[in-house]
Amino acid sequence: MTTTAKYRARLPQLDQDRIFLTDGGMETTLIFLEGVDLPCFASFDLLKNGEGTAQVRRYYSRYAALARDTGMGFVLESPTWRANPDWAAKIGYPRDALADMNRAAIVIMSELRAEYERPRSPMPISGNIGPRGDGYNPGALMSAKEAQDYHGEQIAVFAETEADFVSAFTMNYVNEAIGIARAAKAAGMPSVIAFTVETDGKLPTGQSLKDAIMQVDAETGSAPAYFMLNCAHPTHFIGALKAGEPWTRRLRGLRANASTRSHAELDQATDLDAGNPVELGKQYADLRSRFRHLNVLGGCCGTDFRHVEQICFACEPVAA
């Protein structure tokens, strides 16, 4: 099926000489800083009415304006991390209504792109996919085929929209990542896989990041456009990255947590640990100095506009 997807045939962030910003920790920002009730961390639920939709627009607009004003690219990551059947059912969404919400999310991303994109600030749209289970705990593990069938439903919806690619965030075991990559490939969509790791730099299953990335590539014919790390602090994974090892070149994106807390500690936390935005920016700059191909930069849990702004300023001088 033909769509009006602008960058699906050639993702601009594959040019490693250009930095692309993303937003920060949307759900933690909305819950802890703006007092929004997000059932099951499902930000897509805001799109059910005009007030919530306006809040989503305001949230993204500040980040998109930062990218535009500094001459960087910006990845418009749709608020659909929880918009898959199991999570949606928990908050009362039938499948047809869920598909409508996924479509609506991409429409908003398209409208934001029309408003903020400039020739020197390309803004590809990502249809965001989250894990079937908990983001921190693998729980009931699916086979790669089960994951392909399950996530294929959401990916098929995105394939009919202006989404340029799909991104799977907080992947905590390899079979789910493989299934998503295969489903995206079958739908003609580029994919990005973002793994999360524990404080020891390994996936929650105990598999090393290196082995997880290499396994996904081996079992999908290197289907993902690139890989990312998200929902972990730089101090948790820096030891797992060895400059010069070929597999690290498959990593292009980083969306770290503000906090050095473990996943277990974050799960139990009743407060928001915002860490130190300036320090986080310096840690990103240090990683960029060793891994220049890390060019998609944003935040995850506990981060907000302050963190992404510091990452922006630390990693690239403001354009004149």
Image (cartoon, rainbow, N blue to C red):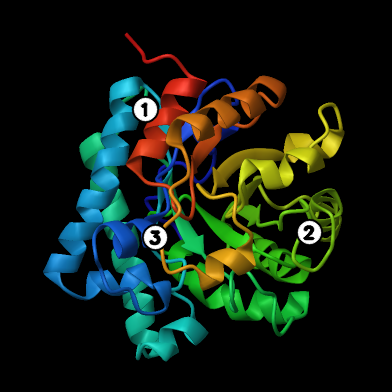
Spatial CA distance of label 2 from label 3 is 33 Å
Q: Residue at x 67, y 42 (%)?
A: 235
Residue 37 % position (x, y): 28, 74
Q: Which residue is mark 3?
A: 28
What distance separates the C-alpha of mark 1 from that of mark 2? 31 Å
Tell me residue 317's x, y (percent): 43, 14
- Give the CA separation, mark 3 to mark 1: 27 Å
Q: Is residue 122 visible?
A: no
**Circle 1 is placed at which residue position?**
121
Q: Residue at x 53, y 72 (%)?
A: 268
The mark that comes first in sequence, 3 or 1, is 3
Q: Residues within 10 Å of mark 2 (few under 14, many from 20)?
A: some
Give the left or right position of residue 191, taking residue 123 as reference. right
Q: Which residue shows up at 75% across the image and 34% down it? A: 249
Q: Nearer the viewer, residue 260 or 218?
A: 260
Q: Residue 101 vs residue 54: left or right? A: right
Lower sequence index among marks 1 and 2? 1
| Residue 267 vertical placement versus 318 (above, below) | below
Give the amino acid type for the residue marked by disc 3 in the picture.
Answer: Thr
Q: Which mark is residue 81?
A: none
Give amino acid for label 2: Thr
For mark 2, what is the residue? 220
Q: Position of residue 76 (x, y in %)?
A: 39, 47
Secondary structure type for disc 1: loop
How many C-alpha atoms fall within 10 Å of the one at disc 3: few (<14), some, or many (≥20)? many
Q: In the rendered view, would you say 206 is above or below 276?
A: below
